[in-house]
Image (cartoon, coloured by chain):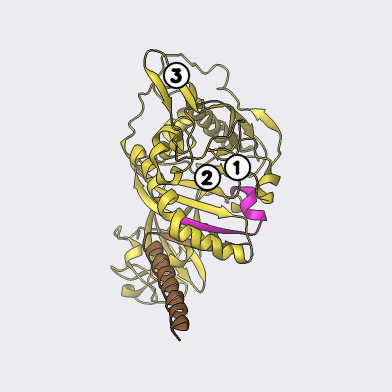
Chain colours: A yellow, B brown
Amino acid sequence: MTHQTTPATPAAPGRRRRAERRDWSTWPAYDAAASGFRGYWYPVTWSSHITGKPQAFTVCGEKVALIRDQGTAYALHDRCPHRGVPLSLGNQQFPSTLSCPYHGWTYNLADGALCAVITDGPRSPIRGKVSVQTYPVAERLGMVWIYIPVAAEEPHPIDSQLPPELVAHPLVMGGRIDPRRGNWRFACENGFDEGHAKYLHRTALWRLFKPMPAWNITRIVQQGRWIFRVQDEVHWDADFPGVGHWSNKRWWKLRPPKQTFNIGNTGAAKKINPTIEAQRFPGFASLSMPGVLRIVYPKFIHYEFYVPVDEHNHRYVGVMVNFARGLSTARFYAKYLLAIRWLFHGQFSGQDAWMVDVTDAPPERLYRPDVSLTAWRNLAEQETAAKQAGVAGAPAGDPL
Amino acid sequence: VRRVLFVLAAVAGLAATWAAARRLARLSGTQVHRINQ
């Protein structure tokens, strides 16, 4: 990945951008991705939840059975080709295999090949003629990830898709995986939405002592596979002509900083964690395909992975990361489990879940801060086009 | 003796709170991990 900073690419030339357009036809690939973008790794569940008992998951509309055998996690299409019964209802009758609960069709976990049919004897003629699809599996950040292929291609290395700072540095993390209603795109757009946090979250307990700005002037900057929201102006008060004064400042809240900041959404702290500072993020909110949000604060980074389940549901994976070692690790555990999980990954995030559930677009009428949404949709189009063209940079590396 | 009992009770209380928080968090899909260390 390069670290060249460029303004986010506008829509491709020739693409019609009439002001009155309110559907998503400007972004055809994005519009068609109601069940998610294929060709990416997605986090599914915590590693410790996958055992020798198979479990069913749906990712990008695909039904997947996950099982662990001799320490390794495997993913198979959750449907026996015989009669369509979910393999996740079956169990292991032989090592390194999974047997369908109905007639004992038994599949190799590694390649999905039908290796035995218990109810048809050792010389069953169908053996070796049938197989179920398998999916590449990886374990990172304490979670099981599976790769949903476009066709039958080899997956790119998962580390090339993860935020680079999570691959290269020792860290401690707390996370929450939560099935939620609403399309994954609404969740993703909500996360990167410039305008929503200041207003929707103004009542969150997580922000009890810190005011949120009233409005900002923001631009979008692209750096490699990521787009960043860069705040040029932050306004804590506003006088609306003929309506009145509005501010989220309160007597019990800390005073907002006088200078414009681009780390955290309530103002920069005096000390910034050196690992975070070394990343030189141009803005505190950034987003990459296939729906990975990064919110940078002075002493921690919050990530959200929006995992498509189907058109109407997604899986929210919220991860709070602290680049700490030693005793600080225990301090973070306590802080996360006693406070952050309930305030930030709880009530605060619940406000987002509420909005994602009730969002109903298109049609839509966008406003100035929605440059964050259109930049994200442009990024999705850009990376999809690059992948389809077989450009090596998607998603494994360089700017598209 | 009272002081020792008080300290022991305080430690036990903290441990119980910690265990309860962790149990509650796990039940609600939450985990904590050390990564790359």
| Lateral position of residue A160 relative to residue A148, left or right | right
The crowding category of the residue bearing disc 2, from other C-alpha atoms within 10 Å (few below 14, some 14 to 19, many at least 20), is many
Q: What distance separates the C-alpha of mark 3 from that of mark 2?
A: 48 Å
- The percent coordinates of residue A347 (x first, y second) are 38, 48
- Which chain is mark 1 on? A
Give the quarter of the image for residue A101.
bottom left
Closer to the eye: label 1 or 2: 1
Residue wearing tag 3:
A239
Q: Which residues are magenta?
A: A160-175
Label placed on residue A313: none
Label placed on residue A39: 2
The crowding category of the residue bearing disc 1, from other C-alpha atoms within 10 Å (few below 14, some 14 to 19, many at least 20), is many
- The percent coordinates of residue A153 (x first, y second) are 55, 48
Q: Amino acid at mark 1?
A: Pro
- Which chain is mark 3 on? A
Q: Amino acid at mark 2?
A: Gly
Q: Amino acid at mark 3?
A: Asp
Which of disc 2 and disc 1 is earlier in sequence? Answer: 2
Q: Are marks 1 and 2 in contact (CB under 8 Å)?
A: yes
Q: Mark 1 and mark 3, same subunit?
A: yes
Which residue is at 29% across, 69% downward?
A: A103
Q: What distance separates the C-alpha of mark 1 from that of mark 3?
A: 44 Å
Whether A299 is drawn above or below A255: the answer is below
| Lateral position of residue A190 relative to residue A8, left or right | left
Q: Secondary structure at mark 2?
A: loop
Whether A29 is drawn above or below A304: the answer is above
- The percent coordinates of residue B21 (x first, y second) are 41, 65
Which of disc 3 and disc 1 is earlier in sequence? Answer: 3
- The percent coordinates of residue A329 (x first, y second) are 58, 63
The crowding category of the residue bearing disc 3, from other C-alpha atoms within 10 Å (few below 14, some 14 to 19, many at least 20), is few
